[in-house]
């Protein structure tokens, strides 16, 4: 017997096995049919024909007959990877993504509860080594999880504590039929090279053991969870989400003072929530962190068609990428007016010769008369003095009277002559 961890599903559940006809999935299927037949309500199999190997159709015919013999429902999906192969691109990730897209669809159609895959302990060690040696060790677990929640079902790997040797022994004992994928012996792919050459060489040294990587994974998982807890606490206590503006504001100094890895996790969590799917590499994050720690006052550090990420004085801001173009508005009588996220109230006492009033956004060279002293000041200088961020500058209402004199600049300036007749409020303020 081999160790199959069946804690991931219940007797009343419908489980689905992704079966490839290789030794691992066939041994797991044999277990589900025989010793574990009472551990679930219903079993269904899914098989993906990649149409790459000459023997692919023979394997499909085999698994169809096998499932038919045991009266197990089987669904087969064909992939066309010819274009990818012709372009000389790696098919591993593309094939995996397409497989899981189909699995996701089928699990919903089948109204199934748990999808099983036959990843085993040797796969786990290989994954840990791969993630360590490729720098994928700070943002996620080093290895695979036994149980993972997907959108509509649970993904379970019941053989994670079972070695490949145990699987082979079981296959021989029960004469489980299977097909060997000859490409597994080729070291052209990184994972194959790790599996066939590097890890065996480590185990050949009596002072070394690849199983030590399993202990590292357990320790790493504990440390990673602590980092996630710190990141969540920072988000809950420091990060402000302004739903009205589709904006997330992070305090620049507090964020910069955090541990490097916590900063990465915070941004990963925020982007995941915002459904920003563009890949953010650690190298990209590192360049952002350097700018945040520099003396730059304002700059855009990342932009897409949907989002802007920028530094604005003491803030680090992630904001929906749209600028509402505000047309000038002419006012001929008292009343309450709205311009962007500002409300502007003109009282009945406003002087008649001040009309028509025009509300507009700023122009280059705009100046206004100073209150109490002679002279004028540029609107651009006023915005800098008040550390108004770039996106807000483009929305700020400028009030111009009939003499084309600027009499108000948002809530930052109001000509003393109009202090009792004009009232401006920023309705978008926190």
Image (spheres, rainbow, N blue to C red):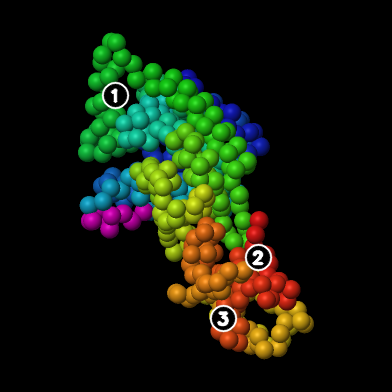
What residue lies at 26% left-to-right and 28% top-to-bottom? 196
Instruction: Please check the rendered image and state whether residue 81 is part of the magenta-colored stretch, yes or no.
Output: yes
Residue at 61% over, 49% down: 240
- Which range is magenta? 79-87
As drawn, the residue found furthest toward the right would be 348
Residue 405: which numbered mark, if any? 3
- Looking at the image, do the residues carrying marks 1 and 3 touch, with CB atoms under 8 Å apart? no
Image point 31% across, 14% down: which residue?
Answer: 208
Q: Is residue 345 left or right of residue 34?
A: right
Q: In this rendering, does residue 410 appear at all?
A: no
Element marked by disc 3? loop
Of the image marks 3 and 2, the number of the one nearer the N terminus = 3
Judge left or right: residue 310 versus residue 153: left
Q: Nearer the viewer, residue 234 or 158?
A: 234
Task: Count neighbours of disc 2 (C-alpha within 10 A) and say few if under 14, some if 14 to 19, many if 20 or more.
Answer: some
Q: Reading the chain from its start, which is encountered first: label 1 or label 3? A: 1
Is label 1 or label 3 in front? 3
Q: How many marks?
A: 3
Q: Which residue is mark 1?
A: 199
**Helix, strand or loop at disc 2?**
strand
Q: Secondary structure at mark 1?
A: helix
Measuring from the top left, give residue 251's x and y in whole percent.
54, 46
Taking the image as shown, residue 198 lies to the left or right of residue 252, namely: left
Q: Quadrant of the C terminus?
A: bottom right
Give the residue at mark 2: 426
Task: State how far apart marks 1 and 3 are (Cα).
Answer: 78 Å
Residue 362, how many percent across, how many down?
Answer: 51, 74
């Amino acid at each position: 017997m081999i160790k199959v961890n069946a804690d991931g599903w219940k007797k009343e559940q419908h489980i689905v096995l992704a079966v490839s006809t290789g030794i691992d999935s066939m041994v797991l299927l044999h277990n589900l049919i025989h010793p574990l037949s009472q551990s679930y309500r219903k079993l269904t199999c899914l098989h993906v024909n990649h149409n790459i190997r000459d023997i692919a159709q023979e394997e499909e015919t085999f698994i169809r007959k096998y499932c038919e013999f045991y009266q197990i429902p089987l669904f087969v999906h064909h992939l066309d990877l010819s274009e990818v192969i012709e372009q000389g691109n790696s098919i591993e990730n593309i094939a995996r993504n397409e497989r899981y897209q189909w699995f996701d669809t089928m699990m919903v159609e089948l109204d199934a509860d748990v999808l099983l895959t036959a990843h085993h302990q040797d796969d786990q060690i290989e994954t840990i080594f791969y993630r360590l040696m490729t720098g994928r060790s700070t943002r996620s677990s080093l290895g695979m999880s036994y149980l993972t929640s997907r959108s509509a079902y649970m993904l379970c790997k019941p053989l994670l504590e079972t070695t490949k040797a145990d699987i082979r022994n079981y296959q021989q004992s029960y004469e489980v039929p299977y097909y060997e994928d000859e490409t597994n012996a080729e070291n052209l792919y990184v994972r194959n090279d790790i599996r066939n050459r590097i890890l065996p060489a480590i185990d050949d040294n009596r002072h070394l053991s690849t199983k030590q990587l399993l202990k590292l994974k357990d320790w790493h998982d504990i440390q990673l969870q602590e980092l996630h807890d710190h990141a969540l606490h920072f988000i809950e206590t420091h990060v402000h989400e302004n739903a009205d503006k589709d904006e997330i504001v992070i305090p620049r100094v507090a964020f910069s003072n955090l541990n490097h890895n916590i900063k990465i996790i915070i941004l990963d969590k925020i982007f995941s929530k915002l459904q920003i799917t563009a890949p953010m590499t650690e190298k990209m994050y590192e360049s952002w962190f350097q700018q945040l720690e520099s003396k730059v006052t304002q700059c855009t550090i990342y932009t897409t068609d949907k989002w802007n990420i920028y530094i604005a004085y003491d803030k680090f801001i992630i904001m929906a990428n749209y600028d509402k173009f505000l047309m000038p508005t002419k006012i001929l009588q008292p009343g309450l007016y709205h311009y962007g996220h500002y409300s502007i109230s003109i009282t009945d006492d406003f002087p008649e010769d001040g009309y028509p009033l025009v509300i507009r956004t700023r122009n280059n060279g705009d100046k206004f008369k100073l209150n109490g002293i002679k002279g004028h000041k540029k609107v651009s200088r006023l915005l800098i003095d008040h550390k108004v961020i770039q996106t807000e500058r483009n929305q700020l209402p400028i009030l111009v009277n009939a003499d084309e004199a600027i009499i108000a600049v948002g809530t930052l300036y109001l000509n003393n002559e109009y202090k009792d007749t004009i009232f401006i409020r920023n309705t978008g303020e926190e």
